[in-house]
Amino acid sequence: MTKKIFSGVQPTGNLHLGNYLGAIKNFVELNNDQENECIFCVVDLHAITVKQNPKELRNNIRETVATFVASGINPQKSIIFNQSTISAHTEAAWILSCVAKMGWLNRMTQFKEKAGKDKEKASIGLYSYPILMAADILLYDASHVPVGEDQKQHLELCRDIAQKFNNDFEVENFLKVPEPLIQREFSRIMSLKDGTKKMSKSEISDLSRINLTDDKDSIINKIKKAKTDPLPLPTNIKDLELRPEAKNLLRIYSSLTNLSLEKVIKTFEGKNFSEFKEKLSQVLSDKIDPISKEIKKLMNDKDFLDKILLEGYQKANDIASDKVKKMHEIIGF
Ligand code: TYM
């Protein structure tokens, strides 16, 4: 059965290993399956829910496209486009915000985390952000949405919104209820400095993450400085429960080598971290360094990147504007 894949990434700079292993690596595999129809969106409207520098934003939009392509997404096979170029997204978001309930949004944990203590000062966009995300997905009748664990709650909200719209207007199946695609083990890559915190682009210390633009030397340096514990590597998975840093590093190794966590544990059991870290740096730089070099090369060819976005816009706009037109008719506009 053809899967209709949709996902988005914010162009806020510093795309990192968490974005890669939790989402982009999966995008590439889905793109490579001939059966699938894939759409990958640079979600710049989501990015402006927190303050952005216009010049940097423009650059980061292109860098996100470059990262998609450098990671292996083929723009001839998948649609890659920039969210703000298609007005149907904001239009559908408004319509859906009249369907969604305040109570549903009040439960969103990401807003609570991002807004921090001073909720009053957060933008309204940051609060209603999951509704825009629902609009993104529902405009394209996506059947499957590959994301990391942190987006799971937003996808559940998207499903609720779709069902409520269909019920309210008595249009069964008009908005397709999407399935999340979350790779259990790698859906939450943690900070290199604290194994209990998510690897994130907003973390101040650059040592906490591997950026997809890092070169070999900085990867080696960051892994060398990554937090560990004083024990040798464990002999079984259960022993990882109270060792978040060891668990995170072993999972990263497992994801990059496509070996099961059990196999990785068997390979390194009883060894000390320095030996394991050397091997981890090697597999990381084998994977990330070529992506990093390719991103830098593509960033010198802005016309190529802009052409991808233009072609993506043309294809995506046909689908999205048709869907929003149907929404207008259903609502009675
Ligand atoms: P964003 O830009 O924060 O992150 C992009 C993708 O990377 C995943 N991710 C992680 N996965 C594992 N470990 C981590 N440490 C980690 N950090 C980030 C995210 O789960 C995500 O899949 N709201 C979305 C963007 C969006 C979207 C959409 C996604 C907008 N519209 C429609 C899917 C469908 C976001 O802010 O992702």
Image (cartoon, grey):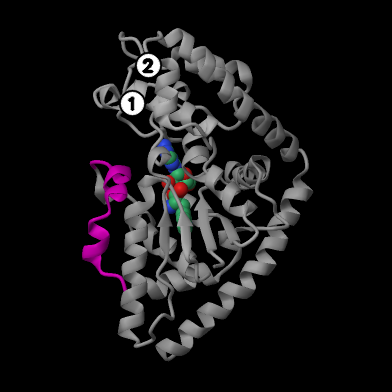
- Give left or right: position of 211 versus 130: right
Query: In the rendering, which numbered label is found on residue 227?
Result: 2
Quarter that holds the C terminus: bottom left
Q: Quadrant of residue 98?
A: bottom left
- Which numbered disc flags the more N-terminal residue, 2 or 1? 1
- CA gap, disc 2 and disc 1: 8 Å
- Is residue 101 highlighted in magenta? yes
Main SS class of the magenta portion in the image:
helix
* Crowding near the residue tagged with mark 2, few <14, some 14–19, many ≥20 C-alpha atoms within 10 Å: some
> How many badges with numbers are in the image?
2
Nearer to the camera, 131 or 186 = 186
- Is residue 126 highlighted in magenta? no
Does residue 59 appear in this view?
A: yes
Image coords of residue 277 (percent x, y): 48, 14
Amino acid at pointer 1: Gly
Look at mark 1 in the image and give the residue it sits on. Answer: 195
Magenta range: 99-117
Q: Is residue 297 above or below residue 235?
A: below
User: Tags 2 and 1 in contact by the CB under 8 Å rule?
Assistant: yes
Please report the residue visible at 21 percent of the width from the left and 64 percent of the height from the top. Answer: 103
Please report the residue visible at 33 percent of the width from the left and 75 percent of the height from the top. Answer: 163
Does residue 194 appear in this view?
A: no
Quarter that holds the N terminus: bottom right
- Give left or right: position of 215 versus 265: right
